[in-house]
Image (cartoon, grey):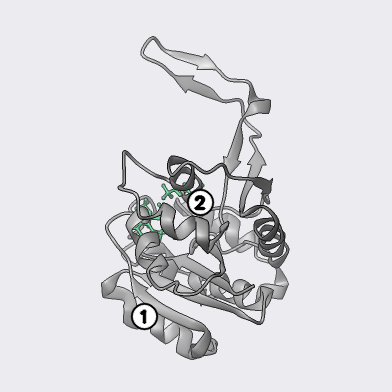
């Protein structure tokens, strides 16, 4: 089955607070985005990438592709004001039936193993959403205060979120209601249940400055 990864790098990184969007910050001398593209291209020789970038950073993204990758395997498209819109723009470039991976560019520690695990399950069930257990206790904030939740019933959701294109592409034609924070919630709002797979503790989302320190320490030597 054809494999397409929509890598969303269209954000500005408000929580990181850096002038340069975090996907371009250096990790061991290479832009964070390099590691994300690299691991997907290595996971499958026949995988193509649709890279979603902010309009003002298309040239910077193209320079990374020209310097490190086979440019025939990576296409660039422009992002939107929200992650939902960026994913939607990326999906407009999916023209053939495929297994589609949607991945946060800033989860640069994702492993080839997780990418393959998600692919195999999406091929079988139509979807694969990686999740990990919470190490912390969790509470629901209510009008009265807060309630303890059963931690065993909570999971933390990661990317890549992987779907058959026949599910994902029509799901993104629905109107954005409230805030969709990931693809699984869009597909569910469209009326289709999703399947979970085991995620990875190391697959962190670089969000705050401390995450960069952790990513530098966790970066496998095979990625360098
Ligand atoms: N309009 C947007 C917003 C986010 N993203 C991408 O979605 C991923 C996860 O989003 P997040 O970590 O929230 O990134 P930012 O939106 O850049 O960060 P912040 O919310 O702190 O501004 C990132 O790879 C980001 O580039 C995107 O493609 N388009
Ligand atoms: C998609 C995601 O990474 C799953 O955990 C997350 O929802 C993205 O959230 P953000 O607020 O856009 O960083």
- Give the quadrant of ligand 1: bottom left
Image quadrant assignment for residue 53: bottom left
Foreground residue among 122 and 145: 122
- Up-down: is 148 above or below 76? above
Q: Is residue 63 visible?
A: yes
Q: Residue at x 51, y 60 (%)?
A: 166
Q: Which residue is mark 2?
A: 210
In front of the other: 120 or 109? 120
Residue 22 picture location, percent across and down: 41, 63
Image side of residue 156 versus residue 32, left or right: right
* Mark sitting on residue 84: none
Disc 1 designates what residue? 60
Dot 2 lies on which element?
helix
Q: Position of residue 80 (x, y in %)?
A: 29, 61
Which of disc 2 and disc 1 is earlier in sequence?
1
Outermost residue toward the top in this view = 144
């Amino acid at each position: 089955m054809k494999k397409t990864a929509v890598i969303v790098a269209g954000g500005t990184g408000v929580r990181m607070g850096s002038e340069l969007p975090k996907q371009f910050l250096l990790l061991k001398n290479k832009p964070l985005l390099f590691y994300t593209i690299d691991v997907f291209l290595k996971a499958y020789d026949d995988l193509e990438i649709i890279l979603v970038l902010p309009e003002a950073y298309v040239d910077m993204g193209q320079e990374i592709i020209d310097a490190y990758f086979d440019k025939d395997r990576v296409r660039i498209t422009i992002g939107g004001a929200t992650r939902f819109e960026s994913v939607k723009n990326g999906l407009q470039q999916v023209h053939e039936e495929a297994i589609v991976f949607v991945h946060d560019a800033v989860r640069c520690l994702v492993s080839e193993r997780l990418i393959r695990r998600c692919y195999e399950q999406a091929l079988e069930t139509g979807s694969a959403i990686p999740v990990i257990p919470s190490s912390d206790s969790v509470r629901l904030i209510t009008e009265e205060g807060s309630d303890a939740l059963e931690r065993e019933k909570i999971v933390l959701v990661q990317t890549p979120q992987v779907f058959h294109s026949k599910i994902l592409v029509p799901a993104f034609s629905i109107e954005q209601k409230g805030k969709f924070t990931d693809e699984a919630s869009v597909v569910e709002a469209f009326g289709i249940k999703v399947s979970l797979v085991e995620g990875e503790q190391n697959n962190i989302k670089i969000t705050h400055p401390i995450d960069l320190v952790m990513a530098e320490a966790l970066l496998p030597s095979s990625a360098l």
